[in-house]
Image: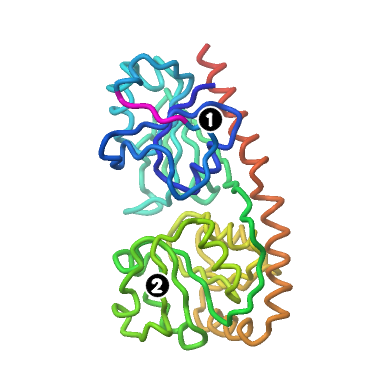
Amino acid sequence: MNVLLWHVHGSWTTSFVHGRHRYLVPVTPDRGPYGLGRARTYPWPDSAVEVTPEELAGADVDLVLLQRPEELELAERWLRRRPGRDVPAVYVEHNTPKGDVPNTRHPMADRDDLLLTHVTHFNELFWDNGGTRTAVVEHGIVPPAVEWTGELNRLAVVTNEPIRRWRVTGTDLMPRFADVAPLDVFGMGVTGLAQRLGLPEERVASHDDLPQGVMHVELARRRAYLHLCRWTSLGLSLIEAMTIGMPVVALATTEAVDAVPPDAGVLATRVDTLVEAARWLAEDRDAAYRLGARAREVTKERFGLDRFLADWDRIVEEETCASR
């Protein structure tokens, strides 16, 4: 199949384009948010092909995969075909609802021309999807090429824009953990975090937008993975850390409660409990190894790439066959 999709979320798209289809990825001269093209920091196969808006008008497209509401109009304009009517369409919702939760109405609610696919069961439950058909395809990842060593008695955090998002990403909680062990914060927009928190950089070190492979190598050297997001979809970075073999210390919120079993980490809504868990793992490397080994075992089974791609193959086939 020829599947049109925009490059929105790097890690998720990296997994998706490892399937057996041909993936048409829009590219524009400015490589802006609607024309980013192929990834530059993730390994993508040759089956992910860059296409310009002009080329899409005559392109053979079997399915449109939408990820933002405005892509409906954009796809119709660039394809000169209506997604969901002239060409099958699936909408992927990556995020938890915002606003009046749990009454937040999804932008694709009450549509009969597409399938609304969520990445977690929590998200499907909390969004008001109306009468739109829904499905859940849990994450699957390309396994990192490294395994946990944990020789550095430091805590790793992967997050994007923690200064702007603040309470959403649990940034306000970081000083309590920095008292236990130094934090290494990886992701986009993390520069200046220590200053914003009023802490010395030796307690909170920022690693801004490293290539994925380099970040995985650095994560594997840290003692444990710290997940402080209050309200977010299940982050792929959490799954990647678990696959590396990192023990998890996490807020017991959203899908993390289901994704991290109790023998793979410590989850709680009581921050004191998590601080003590971080202290325990910092002092007991053997315990960290045991929890991390269980985390690796669980994620390889549940969030494996083969399962993810098989689920998506079924959806692609069902939606294209139904349209015919």
Amino acid found under the numbered disc labelled 2: Ser
Above or below for 128 versus 234: above
In this view of the protein, can residue 63 be seen by the observer? yes
Mark number for residue 206?
A: 2
Q: Is residue 125 visible?
A: no
In the displayed structure, 110 sits above or below 214; it is above
Residue 93 is drawn in which quadrant?
A: top left
Per the rendered image, the range of residues in magenta is 49-53
Left or right: 49 as drawn, with respect to 298: left
**In magenta segment, residue 51:** yes
Q: Residue at x 57, y 73 (%)?
A: 249
The residue that disc 1 covers is 47
Kind of residue indicated by mark 1: Ser
In the image, what residue occupies the spot 48% across and 83% down?
182
Q: Residues within 10 Å of mark 2 (few under 14, many from 20)?
A: many
Compare marks 1 and 2 and give the one earlier in the sequence. Answer: 1
CA distance separating discs 1 and 2: 35 Å
Q: Position of residue 275 (x, y in %)?
A: 53, 83
